[in-house]
Amino acid sequence: MTVPDADALLFDVFGTVVDWRSGVIRDGERLGEEHDLDVDWAAFADAWREAYQPSMDRVRRGEIPWRNLDALHRDSLETLLDRLGVDGLAEDEVDYLTRVWHRLDPWPDAVPGLRRLRTRYLIAPLSNGHVRLLANMAKRAGIPWDLILSAELAGRYKPDEEAYLTAVDLLDLPPERVVMVAAHETDLDAGREAGLRTAYVHRPLEWGPHRADDVDRPDDGEYDVVADDVEDLAGKLGT
Amino acid sequence: MTVPDADALLFDVFGTVVDWRSGVIRDGERLGEEHDLDVDWAAFADAWREAYQPSMDRVRRGEIPWRNLDALHRDSLETLLDRLGVDGLAEDEVDYLTRVWHRLDPWPDAVPGLRRLRTRYLIAPLSNGHVRLLANMAKRAGIPWDLILSAELAGRYKPDEEAYLTAVDLLDLPPERVVMVAAHETDLDAGREAGLRTAYVHRPLEWGPHRADDVDRPDDGEYDVVADDVEDLAGKLGT
């Protein structure tokens, strides 16, 4: 246990707590069946997700003012549907698909692990997803957050430092008593730079089983904790 | 049912959801017994609470920058202890007493009513208490919020309009789809002014049984809903 005296854990969400890829494929396939669309929904999910970082970069660089993920996802979805030659979807169907990111399911270990961690720590998401998205997701999936934090509260996307520092400020804690938990090293490195402790959670299936070998697991010691999943993290933090 | 198509309910907390007076008396009496203090803890609770609005007014008028309730409560507690001639408390005891506002118990109807309301609406506090205070309170008392909102997120205390509008913005809803719920007409009037729907909850015992008759219950029709308590509100909203 190398996270002495932490009081709160902040979790990255997409990929770390929830399996975005399976959720997008699930809702895409349903829509595809209804409309008899010829779309590879796994490739669709990957392409949509790949548009995610570039869409936030325009906000990060200050080229456009803060826009939440629904707005960014909607733009990139329209581009993607055009590229795939999908038309004939009604406005409300495109809206519904845009918000599939509110309806993602947790990895099987996530909720049981969070329930254990919650007995000792304040637990909250710190996602680039906006507050409403995270609230809808938690309510639908039964994710037992103590409170919902988001990059939206800083008006800055992770890995901008302000996203971490605003969350820490709202927790009313010094950063060293807060642990950033994520499956992505960029997020952890930025959290550490902002003064937080770090816990890596390994998610080799984030981009699908065929890409599991591409996801490197950092060595123990690269972060304060390196865990196989959220249940393993709960054990390593003594809960 | 006069709140058509609302999606979210925002609750005032001190007095509306939790019984601050009994909680302050409880922890005061405990401390008083340990130190053999001759203090009327009911009068103490009332005097501390009476310092609440004036302490926020200095922030509201811009005389001092945003400070959270722990800081304001600490200042007013020290003044009050001085006035009562109480000394000999250790620093950590004064800290602990300052944070009694994190440890208040809900009125008996509050949690059962919120559980019912939560099946249909997003429910959140919108309190002048800060995010951490509200998270600690909810965790200790099992208050089933979907998310925690606070005037702190606007850096402005209720009834300043920004407190309501920031919460509505984070809910990503138009104000008319959000209901402000409170036992205090000032709060409801300001919420209505900001475009929200309103629900009054009657709390005649907020200032103790001897002052129950001083708490006027507004007529039905003065707000979108006028309810006897949170369970009654749940019934009136069809849950």
Image (cartoon, coloured by chain):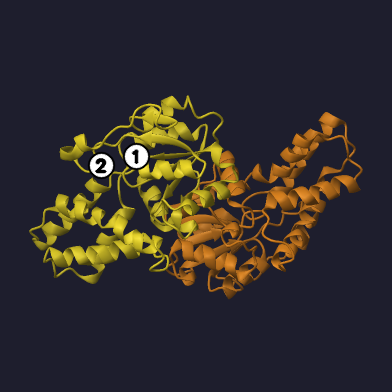
Chain colours: A orange, B yellow
Q: Nearer the viewer, residue B184 or A22?
A: B184
Q: Position of residue A191 (x, y in %)?
A: 58, 69
Circle 2 chain: B
> Is residue A52 found left or right of A3 in the rendered image?
right
What is the crowding at mark 2: few (fewer than 14 residues within 10 Å), some, or many (at least 20)? many
Q: Position of residue A21 (x, y in %)?
A: 74, 48
Say which element carries label 2.
loop
Q: Position of residue B173 (x, y in %)?
A: 59, 42
Residue visible at 25% across and 68% down in the picture? B92
Q: Which residue is mark 2?
A: B206
Q: Determine the CA span between mark 1 and mark 2.
A: 9 Å
Relative to A142, say whether B116 is above or below.
above
Return the mark for residue A130: none
Q: Earlier in the sequence, mark 1 or mark 2?
A: 1
Are circles 1 and 2 on residues that touch, CB within 8 Å?
yes
Q: Position of residue B88 (x, y in %)?
A: 14, 70
Residue visible at 50% across and 50% down in the picture? A145
Location of residue B16 (image quadrant): top left
Q: Which residue is mark 1?
A: B183
